[in-house]
């Protein structure tokens, strides 16, 4: 495993990390198996944004007695209310949820205290000038958190954070689908440019600027959505119309300026091994540009990456899981029995959707969730 400096924090993190969100679906033994495999392969950084109590406790049990070997990104503002994840800035609830995180992870400090999920400039300024940031800074002064970070999907908000003098590192969504914009409407010409591999000439200018600012100012980046929720692994679901491998996705993210580590979501130890294969991959295996050069199409909005920020749902639908099961089902000619069983076991599913669209206002990627719920209801009828 190779390690990189995380900006100016003084921390050295494994370039392959552990994003904990998929662990929410697993029991204590399964979580421990994944985390043990991460440790065996040199992974030393994990992200826990999830507020669900069981997954926090399971992670805490898995790292018990080994806390010092882990650099933990713990989120401030991710809460569990009435059986659902809720992002909030209500300080009373924020404090209680953060104390719960410390208790369940069995630790008295968090290495990277993350201001959770800020995607609007106005909200960032409100946080920066209000009691929320004051609380975060107080935690740092007391040593309860060692460094201040922030998670966002918006490059403009990330830029504000990087230049603020308050935020030391950023958790940001990076993959070729989110980064690339066509230089012209001629897709064939755009993707066949000889300069593509060297210059990445089609990268969205605001994202390119963000990476440069982070590199210049010592603001470390850890990556979320490096696989775009797994969509990039299949030509049918990839927005490019071609499949990439985990190694190619990782190489793309790790070659962006400022990036220190990619926080990969794992369901099983096999998924861990597929990611850490990057460490011994050849240059040919890492080459994503050669694949994208022949891509027949491009798009990056409207894609569900199962991030869960659409929650809470007034009907307590696990929207991210419903969307994942819908996507899995539509990859086959017929709905697989296992997928149908998982769907029917959900306490609430697409048939319970009332079409209020409150979830759509919170989606970072503009997914038409209400419309997808209707399609899912018909598919599983």
Image (cartoon, rainbow, N blue to C red):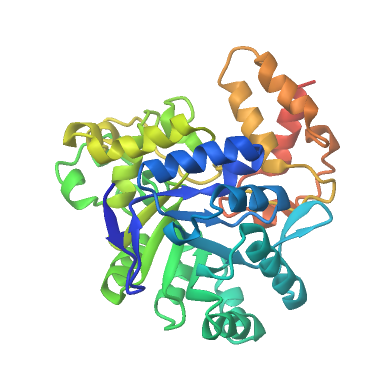
Residue 59 locus on image (x, y percent): 59, 50
Looking at the rendering, in which quadrant would you find the C terminus?
top right
Instruction: Specify the quadrant of the image occupied by residue 93.
Output: bottom right
Query: Residue 168 falls in which quadrant of the image?
Result: bottom left
> In the current view of this chain or complex, which residue is farthest to the front?
65
x, y percent for residue 57: 67, 52
Q: In the figure, 112 relative to 125: above or below?
A: above
Front in this rendered view, residue 228 or 283: 283
Q: Nearer the viewer, residue 3 or 290?
A: 3
Callout count:
0
The location of residue 302, given as percent across then percent down, is 56, 44
Q: Residue at x 33, y 72 (%)?
A: 10
Residue at x-position 53% and y-position 55% = 65
Q: Position of residue 165 (x, y in %)?
A: 42, 83
Above or below: residue 123 compared with residue 19: below
Q: Is residue 187 visible?
A: no
Q: Residue at x 69, y 14 (%)?
A: 337
Relative to 157, does residue 200 appear above or below in the rendering?
Answer: above
Front residue of this view, candidates 342 and 349: 342
Q: Is residue 278 visible?
A: yes
Left or right of residue 38: residue 286: left
Q: Is residue 174 above or below residue 207?
A: above
Left or right of 74? Residue 233 is: left
């Amino acid at each position: 495993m190779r390690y990189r400096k995380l900006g100016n924090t003084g921390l050295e993190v494994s370039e392959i990390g552990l994003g904990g969100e998929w662990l929410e679906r697993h029991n204590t033994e399964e979580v421990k198996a994944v985390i043990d495999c991460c440790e065996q392969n040199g992974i030393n950084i994990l992200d826990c944004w999830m507020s669900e109590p069981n997954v926090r406790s399971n992670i805490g049990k898995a790292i018990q007695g080994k806390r010092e070997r882990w650099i933990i990104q713990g989120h401030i503002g991710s809460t569990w209310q009435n059986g659902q994840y809720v992002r909030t800035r209500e300080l009373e609830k924020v404090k209680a949820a953060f104390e719960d995180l410390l208790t369940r992870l069995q630790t008295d400090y968090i290495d990277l205290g993350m201001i959770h999920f800020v995607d609007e400039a106005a909200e960032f300024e409100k946080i920066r000038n209000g009691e929320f940031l004051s609380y975060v800074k107080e935690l740092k002064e007391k040593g309860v958190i060692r460094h201040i970070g922030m998670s966002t999907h918006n490059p403009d908000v990330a830029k504000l954070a990087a230049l603020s003098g308050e935020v030391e590192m950023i958790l940001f969504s990076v993959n070729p689908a989110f980064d690339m914009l066509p230089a012209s409407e001629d897709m064939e010409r755009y993707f066949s440019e000889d300069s593509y591999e060297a210059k990445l000439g089609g990268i969205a200018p605001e994202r390119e600027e963000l990476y440069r600012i982070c590199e210049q100012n010592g603001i470390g980046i850890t990556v979320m959505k490096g696989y775009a929720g797994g969509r990039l692994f299949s030509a049918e679901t990839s927005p490019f119309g071609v499949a990439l491998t985990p190694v190619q996705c990782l190489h793309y993210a790790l070659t962006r300026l400022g990036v220190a580590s990619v926080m990969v979501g794992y369901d099983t130890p096999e998924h861990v091994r597929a990611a850490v294969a990057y460490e011994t991959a050849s240059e040919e295996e890492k080459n994503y540009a050669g694949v994208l050069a022949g891509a027949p199409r491009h798009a990056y909005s409207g894609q569900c990456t199962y991030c869960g920020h659409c929650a809470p749902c007034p009907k307590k639908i696990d929207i991210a899981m419903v969307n994942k099961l819908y996507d899995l089902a539509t990859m086959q000619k017929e709905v697989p029995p296992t997928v149908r069983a998982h769907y029917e076991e959900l306490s609430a599913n697409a048939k319970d959707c009332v079409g209020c669209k409150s979830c759509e206002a919170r989606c970072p990627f503009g997914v038409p969730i209400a419309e997808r719920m209707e399609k899912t209801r018909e598919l599983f009828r």
